[in-house]
Amino acid sequence: MRFTKKLLSGFAATAAATITFSVSAQNITGAGATFPFPIYAKWADEYKKATNVSMNYQSIGSGGGIKQIQSKTVDFGATDMPLKAEDLAKDGLVQFPAIIGGVVPVTNMDSVKPGEMKLTGPVLADIYLGKIKNWNDKAITDLNPGLKLDGPITVVRRSDGSGTTFLFVDYLSKVSPEWKSKVGVGTAVSWPEGVGGKGNEGVAQYVQRIKGSIGYVEYAYAKKNKLDYIQLKNRDGQFVAPDDTTFAAASAGADWKGTPGMGVILTDQAGAKSWPMTGASFILMHKQQAKPETGKAVLKFFDWALKNGQKSATELDYVPLPPATVSLIQAEWKKITDATGKGIY
């Protein structure tokens, strides 16, 4: 894996991280998901150098991003939970994916190295349901013969509305009927167990501080904070580790064209190498732009990122969208117009 401090020059580990660059001729504003923040930071830095156009992105969680674009306080919103076609229509929004990555369970245990522990989806769900409270529970030790596991489990989860949470609980709902019936799916749920951290940053910080804890974060945050990730058993019965190859495997069969609003959910995908908690992060823009030039500037930024940002995405262990998918995204952009109905792209 390629992951250096240099690559994370724009990656701030704060509870409410913000990418901010000096104001230029056209300042773009966005807010939302913390999941893609590391790559958006890198893209914004590179784009500023290439074009002298600035981008300000507030990493406040998917729920906040959806609210801000609905209230028209930002030029684009970002969410890891795709909106349904009827919600897009109600709010007059266009949605398209920007990047693919993975959510990973992480722990803080002195006796376990990164990638050593193995869990299944149902066992992970039982931990978050509060049914499994100790690391030496038989359900865990049977999966991990030879590992020294002991002590109480401290569950860490998100306290804010979060697309990372959506991907996590969507997966748990697919593998645990009890989770589906008792907790369900959403960017925010009624957690049966745990302490809450704000943003991927907050969860990572809690896991770093609390021995015996388990949390879930986007993979770049796990690597940046040197957290011990867990292998998961996927739909094909194979234990896999999180990385760009297993994220790519999970997204290989995505039906972007046939899904309304391109809102493909990539959790629990088939494939021997598929990471079960893979997800895309989406951009939301108003179909009719009150400020067409600003809307055009946003599209220019993402056009540049999708065409020129593949290397940076791969270096940060995200999966760039392939050219065929980019073409479908550009078709969505043609739906975005000024007040007279004229396309801005």
Image (tube, rainbow, N blue to C red):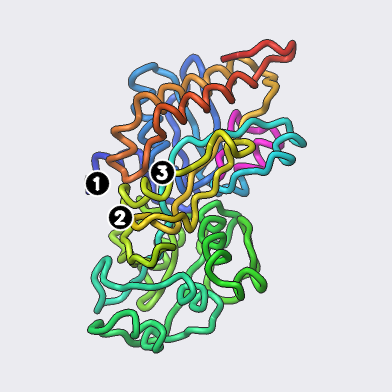
Q: Which residue is drawn at 44% across and 28% down?
A: 324
Q: Which residue is drawn at 33% across and 21% down?
A: 49
Percent across and percent down for residue 150 are: 33, 87
Res 138 quadrant in image? bottom left
The residue indicated by pointer 2 is 223
Res 143 quadrant in image? bottom left
Q: Is residue 171 above or below residue 154?
A: above
Percent across and percent down for residue 211 are: 35, 77
Q: Along the line of sight, which residue is nearer the eye, 195 or 22?
A: 195
Q: Along the line of sight, which residue is nearer the eye, 14 or 248?
A: 248
Q: Residue at x 42, y 72 (%)?
A: 120
Query: Dot 3: what SS?
Result: loop
Kindly report the distance in space between the C-alpha atoms of the residues bearing marks 3 and 1: 24 Å
Kindly report the distance in space between the C-alpha atoms of the residues bearing marks 1 and 2: 8 Å
Of the 4 image quadrants, the one containing the C terminus is: top right
Give the amino acid at mark 2. Answer: Lys
Q: Is residue 192 above or below residue 37?
A: below
Query: Which-is-in-front pick, marks 3 and 1?
Result: 3
Is 238 left, or right, of 293 in this rendering? left
C-beta proximity under 8 Å, tags 1 and 2: yes
> Of the residues under marks 3 and 1, which one precedes in the sequence?
1
The residue indicated by pointer 1 is 3
The residue indicated by pointer 3 is 252
Magenta stretch bounds: 65-79
Percent across and percent down for residue 164 are: 51, 54
